[in-house]
Amino acid sequence: MALEDDPKATPSAELATTRAVPYPTSRLAARIDLVDMAQEIEKADQALGMVVGGKLEVIRDQMRALQEEARRLLDEARISARLHRARCNFRKIPGRVYHLYRRSEDDLYFSMLSPAEWGGSPPHAFEGSYRLEVDMSWTPMNGANAERDRTPEGRALVQKLLSEG
C-alpha cells in the first residue's frame, strides 16, 4: 500500500481530526471548557458594564453642569436685557459704574450719581449699582467696589487688569 492510498497520511485527513479536538492550538494547551468560556464572557460583560456605566455617569454629570451653566447664562442675559432697557439720558461707556433707580413699577432709569452723591436721599428708590462690561453685560457692584471704580486710581487699576488679560 502506497503512502497516497492511506487516508490517515493525507493532510486533509489530519486537519479534519485535529479540528475535532477540543484544544485551542495544540494538543499540549489547556482544554477549553464551555463553563470556563461562559465565566470569561460573564466577567467581560461585568467589566464592560462597569466601564460603560462609569462613562455614562460622567456624561450625565457633564450634562447637568451644562444645563446649570445654560440656566445661569440665560438669567444673566435676562437681567442684562432688563438693564439695557432702562432709561438712560447719556451715552453708556463700558467700564463705568451706573446707578439704577425706580420711579414707578415699570420705570427704571440709570444715573451717574450714587445715592451718597444725592446727599443720602435720592429722588427715587435705589435699585443698585452696575458696571457696564466691554461685552455689554452688567456686573452688580457692592458699595465698596462702586466707589473704588469711580476714582481715577480705581479706573486705572481696572484698565491695567483688563489689559494684562
Image (cartoon, helix red, strand yellow):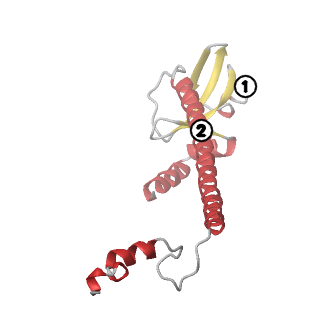
Label 1 belongs to which residue? 121
Residue 84: x and y in percent read 51, 25
Q: Quadrant of residue 51?
A: bottom right
> Which is closer to the viewer, label 2 or label 1?
2
Q: In terms of secondary structure, where does tag 2 sit?
A: helix
* Residue 67, disc: 2
Look at the image and tell me in which quarter the N terminus lies.
Answer: bottom left
* Residue 157, disc: none
The answer to whether 31 appears left or right of 115 in the picture is left
Q: Residue at x 52, y 21 (%)?
A: 85
Q: Residue at x 56, y 32 (%)?
A: 74
Look at the image and tell me in which quarter the C terminus lies.
Answer: bottom left
Q: Nearer the viewer, residue 22 or 36?
A: 22
Q: Nearer the viewer, residue 82 or 53?
A: 53
Q: Residue at x 51, y 74 (%)?
A: 21
Other-residue count near label 2 (Cα within 10 Å), few / some / many at <14 / 14–19 / ≥20: few
Residue 26: x and y in percent read 48, 82
State how far apart marks 2 and 1 are (Cα): 42 Å
In the displayed structure, 127 sits above or below 144; it is above
**Amino acid under label 2?**
Gln
Sequence order check, earlier mark of 2 and 1: 2
